[in-house]
Image: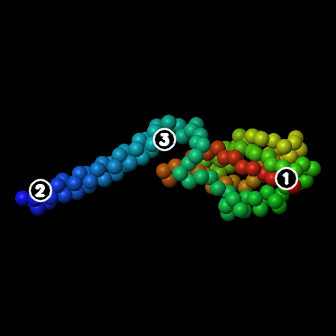
Amino acid sequence: MRKLLLIAALAIFCFTTRAQSANMKDVKETKERLVVDTLRDIRRDTLIFQRAEIEPDFPGGMGAFYKYIANNIKSTGSTGKVFISFLVEKDGSLTRIKIERGLSENADQEAIRLIRQSPKWKPGTLLGRPVRVFYTVPITFK
């Protein structure tokens, strides 16, 4: 009798665990469909994200970005960091360039110049589709 009860309890446990796993998968798929439908219904050009599944990236990675900065930066007579933000568009172009924390007028203008002349980035993606993402980077002046 105990064996029969134990087997029945084990079968119920396995069944409910499998059902919960299937429900979690359904919930995840439903959420993904909801996001996709929302992105489709709303003009996606107007949505701006702070984060994406895959973040925007400079061609070759951030190491290549800082190499680009080092090769193209002009001396400003200032020492320190400028924090600059910009919007990486769906096509990889950079817009809405803004100094978040400046150093000096010359350093700030040089940071803006560097970002404006930057090659196009790889855009951020959400559910496999390119999206507009705000990005902030520090630029160090020595």
Tell me what residue is drawn at x 58 percent, y 46 percent.
51
Left or right side of 14 for 79: right
Residue type, numbered disc 1: Phe
The residue tagged 1 is: 141
Whole-percent x and y of residue 64? 72, 62
User: Can residue 29 be seen in the rendering of this structure?
Assistant: yes
Residue in the image at 62% along x and 52% along y: 56
Residue drawn at 70 percent across, 44 percent down = 86
From what the image shows, is residue 92 above or below residue 37? below
* SS at mark 1 in the image: strand
Residue denoted by label 2 = 5
> Which residue ends up furthest to the left in the rendered image?
1
The residues tagged by marks 3 and 2 sit, at their Cα atoms, a distance apart of: 51 Å
Q: What element carries label 2?
A: helix
- Mark 3 is surrounded, within 10 Å at the Cα level, by few (under 14), some (14 to 19) or many (20 or more) other residues, namely some
Circle 1: is it few (<14), some (14-19), or many (20+) Cα within 10 Å? Answer: some
Amino acid type, callout 2 = Leu
